Image (cartoon, rainbow, N blue to C red):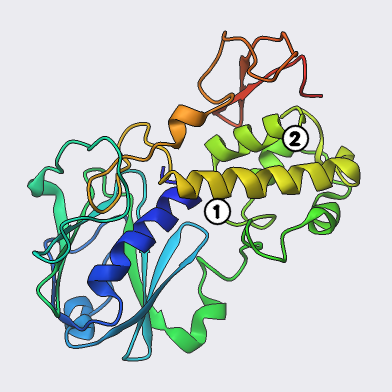
Amino acid sequence: MPELPEVETVRRGLIPAMEGRRILAARAARADLRFPFPERFADRLAGTRVERIDRRAKYLLARLGSGETLLMHLGMSGRFSIAAADLERQPGDFVYAPAADPKHDHVVFEMEGGARVTYNDPRRFGFMSLFETEAEADQRFLKDLGPEPDSNAFSGPHLDAALKGRKTAIKAGLLDQHVVAGLGNIYVCEALWRARISPRRSCASIPGVRAERLAAAVRAVIAEAIEAGGSTLRDYAGVDGAMGYFQHRFDVYGREGEPCRRDGCGGTVRRLVQSARSSFYCPACQR
């Protein structure tokens, strides 16, 4: 599933085609994705201007001139593509992913200025929703999210308070969207390695010096992954078809059996399963 850096890369790629432009027409090729489309979905979008495109955790939020917000989630395999004569390139200079199969083109936005933005999703775990922007605080997908990992609200003291007394493993703690918004399995593994913290360690043992190290590691990993356009493992690609490049910088994820990349460590990366997800870590330097 695309994680925060991948979604942020898509957001930035959509801006030239959509932000500040009217949606001339919208088409949905089916009645639903993961959930049914909102009532009168296409009619409510047609003619309205996209004032701004934001991101919250793994959700894209198109702020519309109508006073509504279009919420979009990529699910496991969702991707956007842009066709426009004046937008031949989007952010990303990476290896190109295979073209999306048009039979999975489920939503099309015809934009002012001639751009066509298409949402393609073979597995259909993504979804779209419309809500009154003023009612955002009450939206079930957004209302209980923790701070963004690159915001001022995310810090060592925040982790101190959020993790205090919790007996679950820190890996599960960081995947809890109430603790920090948008983190997924890949970047949690990478951040724990950088912070020298075992994924097995309990949340209750993190507050203090470890929390400061961990907050800094999370911030650094997310920033570097966004700069690299995210990570491509299976289906993710940016709006120009460009695959993310951060997977070539992984220090621990997917490196089971390989030597630890930390200078002077000498350990070997191991994999363990936590809550049905693979955790990659070095038992020699992550304690």
Q: Quadrant of residue 98?
A: top left
Quadrant (top left, top right, bottom left, bottom right) of the C terminus: top right
Q: Quadrant of residue 66?
A: bottom left
Quadrant (top left, top right, bottom left, bottom right) of the N terminus: top left
State the CA–CA distance, disc 1 to disc 2: 19 Å
Report crowding for label 2: few under 14, some 14 to 19, many 20 or more residues within 10 A (C-alpha). Answer: many
What residue type is disc 1 on?
Answer: Gly
What residue type is disc 2 on?
Answer: Ala
Residue 36 placement (x, y as % from top left):
27, 65
Query: Residue 18 vs residue 279: left or right?
Result: left
Q: Is residue 281 above or below residue 85?
A: above
Q: Quadrant of residue 62?
A: bottom left
Q: Is residue 173 above or below residue 16?
A: above
Q: Residue at x 61, y 61 (%)?
A: 148
Q: Can you identify the residue that label 1 sits on?
A: 182
Q: Residue lying farthest bottom?
A: 66
Query: Residue 250 vs residue 270: left or right?
Result: left
Q: Can you identify the residue that label 2 sits on?
A: 195
Taking the image as drawn, is residue 46 in sight?
yes
